[in-house]
Image (spheres, rainbow, N blue to C red):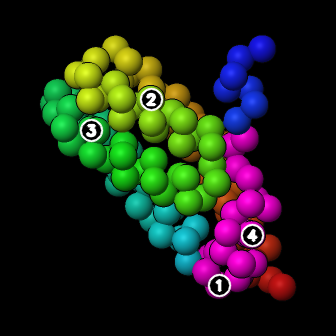
Amino acid sequence: MNALDNLPVFEREKFMEQVAYDRELSIEIIDIFLSEQGGQLADMQRALSAGDYRQLYETAHTIKGSLGSLQAALARFHAEQLESAAKNDNYQSCVKSLAALEGVLKVLEPELLSLRESCSHP
């Protein structure tokens, strides 16, 4: 069994507790994340392609913080791995970590949209 197997994609209850069960705030946070993450992924891909490890590190650091706020532990882990790989200018690890992050974000998005929908309709 892998340590990653224990990391949840999204802890809905922890997130709601963190925002004091405020539906409007939940929607706002989710909307901001979803509107920014596509650009952040594109920025990280461009930075990796250009060998701009500083930019890759900074963007990975930013998305890591957002994922922590969302209670998205698995994606946060991969963002942290990417941040570390970029800090060490490790191309192969960056490629692997970015791919893993993108994969988890594809699983996370419907979870966030589901919560957003439930918060929209009390």
Tell me whether the residue at label 3 lies in contact with that at label 1, contact meaning CB atoms closer than 8 angstroms: no
Residue 72 belongs to magenta span: no
Q: Give the magenta-colored segment's residue range.
A: 8-27
Q: What residue is shown with label 1?
A: 24
Pick whichever of labels 2 and 4 is earlier in the sequence.
4
Q: What residue is shown with label 4?
A: 17
Pick whichever of labels 4 and 3 is earlier in the sequence.
4
How packed mark 3 is, by other alpha carbons closer than 10 Å (few <14, some 14-19, many 20 or more), is many
State which mark lies toward you, 2 or 3.
2
Q: What residue is shown with label 3?
A: 56
CA separation in Å, label 2 and label 4: 27 Å
Whole-percent x and y of residue 16?
73, 69
Quick check: 17 left or right of 34?
A: right
Check the image and report above or below for 13 versus 72: below
Question: As shown in the figure, which amino acid type bears the numbered disc 2?
Answer: Gln
Pick whichever of labels 1 and 2 is earlier in the sequence.
1
Whole-percent x and y of residue 60?
36, 43
Q: Residue at x 31, y 47 (%)?
A: 59
Q: What residue is shown with label 2?
A: 81
